Image (cartoon, grey):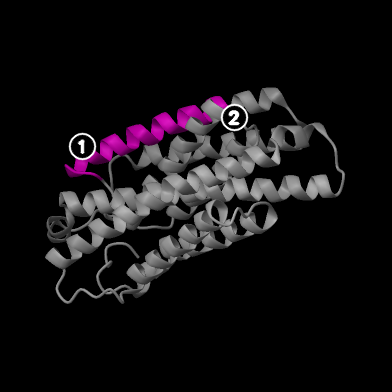
Amino acid sequence: MTNASWLYDITILLYSLSVLGYFIDFLQNNRRANQFAFWLLSIVWVLQTAFLVMQIIEIGGFPILTPFEGLFFYAWVIVSLSLLINWFFRVDFFVFFANVLGFSIMAINLFATREQASSLLTEQLMSELSIIHITMAFLSYGAFSLSFIFSVMYLIVYQMLKGKKWSKRLRRFGDLSQLEKLSYLCSVLGVPLLLLSLILGIVWALIKVDQFSLLDSKVIISFFVLIAYSTYLYQKVARDMEGKSLAMWNIAAFLIVLVNVFFSGTFSDFHFWYV
């Protein structure tokens, strides 16, 4: 177990308080709670980054080879991207929804083993190709996660407008066109990252893995994710699809991402370090 585990525990405690602050703001339109939650989230990001750096120093490489390390990095990506998007676009409730997801991942990660990968496993996997492959995959999952959140927010606003529920809360969600645009931009970022990750992963596997097969469960579901989001982009760009149907497609595509992150490795023949 890493010597920095205490830092993880403090981080998740502050993270829970941040999410609670955003929840109070969501229910009561409380700007003070929103500001308090934002500063707590900023501290969470600093602590997450410090934890990441401490792990890098401890293992002498990028910590992404175990379930605990992978999910932690995934949560860090979500926090980082949510703060970045909030800085440029100021969609009030976006950070709340994004960090409900990020906190859920960190909470789930409490049940993941914190043991380090064995020295033999590290030797097999610690190559530039494999590290870049895994890192780019999680960056793409982070982008898809935010795209999913914008689509969920789109559907909430759509239903509120349809039900003529005019309120201050509705204005703070942002308008439909902005939410759809941000969802699309996040997917535009995620698709090439995932494509490059798959190419690098296949090249690495051909070099390092005996009896590699494209029929491996992790590979197959990763391609399903790529196809689902590529189809989403095709429908948006080529067929000019928009609105509720496009948002629903995006949400369905993200469900495949969740399957890929949490379940597909269990049935994989060579993704044995991440199940």
Q: Which is more toward the observer, 226 or 211?
A: 226
* Pointer 2 residue: 37
Would you say residue 52 sits in the magenta stretch?
A: yes
**Whole-percent x and y of residue 190?**
42, 49
Q: Is residue 95 visible from the viewing direction of this image?
A: yes
Q: Tell me if residue 85 comes above or below residue 237 in the rendering.
A: above
Q: Is residue 162 left or right of residue 202?
A: right
Image quarter in which the C terminus is found: bottom left
**Whole-percent x and y of residue 65?**
26, 54
Answer few, some or many: residues within 10 Å of disc 1's Cα (few below 14, many 20 plus, some between 14 and 19): few
Q: Which residues are magenta?
A: 38-62
**Whole-percent x and y of residue 43?**
46, 28
Would you say residue 28 sits in the magenta stretch?
A: no
Q: How many marks?
A: 2
Residue at far right of view: 164
* Pointer 1 residue: 57
Q: Principal SS element in the magenta part?
A: helix
Answer few, some or many: residues within 10 Å of disc 2's Cα (few below 14, many 20 plus, some between 14 and 19): many
Q: Tell me if residue 72 comes above or below residue 269 in the rendering.
A: above
